[in-house]
Image (spheres, rainbow, N blue to C red):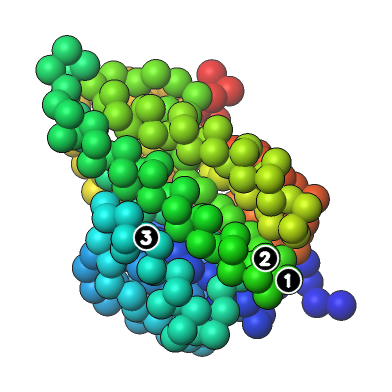
Amino acid sequence: MKHPFDLSGKTALVTGANTGLGQGMAVALAKAGADIVLVGRSAPTETLAAIKAAGQKAYDIRADLIETAAAKTALAEAVEIAGQVDVLVNNAGIIRRNDAVDFSEDDWDAVMDVNLKNLFFLSQAFANHCIGRKAPGKIVNIASMLSFQGGIRVASYTASKSGVMGLTRLMANEWAHHGINANAIAPGYFATNNTAALQADEDRNAAILGRIPAGHWGKPEELGGAVVFLASAASNYVHGITLPVDGGWLAR
């Protein structure tokens, strides 16, 4: 019997993996034995190289996940080039910042479309793929600390990530009996391009670090263990959870 965390023979589709958290998770899945399909707007050159260095196949699909049509067709393209998809990691996300009293409809819609609406439709396509071939599957949605908290100046992001946690539970309720595990990871404060503005704000940066028991911003590779766990047989009886990986942030 192979190790329960072994992903040999599996193919994982990871969205938004050209940098940051998506890159860290894609490489971790490859090191656990999975081939990886990368879906995003720009060329994931570094990620492709790291996956190949880990000895796994890497495929690149170019799609703008702000468009529902792109989300619906990305899974079909992945199946066409890789043969099958066993794991879906919904990582692609965007953020817009402004005071709630000034927040624009365009910024609301853009964030909700990428972070929530099209996450759902890509998951729906993946579920139909698994059900159609009578095969198990793993969905790992990327939630946030703002799935649990309100935040400030990120109205649509907070709404979308709260929705991700709720949708993860719904997916688990509806699809568990098909052998599909739907779970989520809620990253804490990680050093990525999405948090560059916070890191550059001296006061906010100090306040954030002062609350993290681990004492530092997370590194993308520190999500690796969580995503491999939720993508592998080790989590076969885990359904509908949102797992914080936050350096102890929520414990405070």
Q: Check if mark 1's residue and mark 2's residue have beta carbons within 8 Å.
A: yes
Residue 22 image position (x, y, % from top left): 40, 58
Which numbered tag is attached to residue 71? 3
- Which kind of residue does numbered mark 1 sit on? Lys
Residue shown at 66% from the left, 80% from the top: 8
Q: Quadrant of residue 139?
A: bottom right
Residue 59 image position (x, y, % from top left): 40, 81
Q: Is 128 left or right of 74, judged from the image as shown? A: right
Q: Nearer the viewer, residue 214 or 61?
A: 61
Q: Which residue is mark 2?
A: 131
Residue shown at 78% from the left, 72% from the top: 3
- Mark 1 is surrounded, within 10 Å at the Cα level, by few (under 14), some (14 to 19) or many (20 or more) other residues, namely few
Badge 1 element: loop
**Residue 26 seen anywhere in this rendered image of the structure:** no
- Mark 3 is surrounded, within 10 Å at the Cα level, by few (under 14), some (14 to 19) or many (20 or more) other residues, namely many
Q: Quadrant of the N terminus?
A: bottom right
Q: Which residue is mark 1?
A: 134
Q: Disc count in the image?
A: 3
Residue 16 image position (x, y, % from top left): 34, 59
- Which kind of residue does numbered mark 2 sit on? Ile
Does label 2 or label 3 sit earlier along the sequence? 3
Badge 3 element: helix
Cα separation, mark 1 vs mark 2, equals 5 Å
Cα separation, mark 2 vs mark 3, equals 18 Å
Residue shown at 51% from the left, 55% from the top: 123
- Mark 2 is surrounded, within 10 Å at the Cα level, by few (under 14), some (14 to 19) or many (20 or more) other residues, namely some
Cα separation, mark 3 vs mark 1, equals 22 Å
Q: Is 43 left or right of 210, judged from the image as shown? A: left
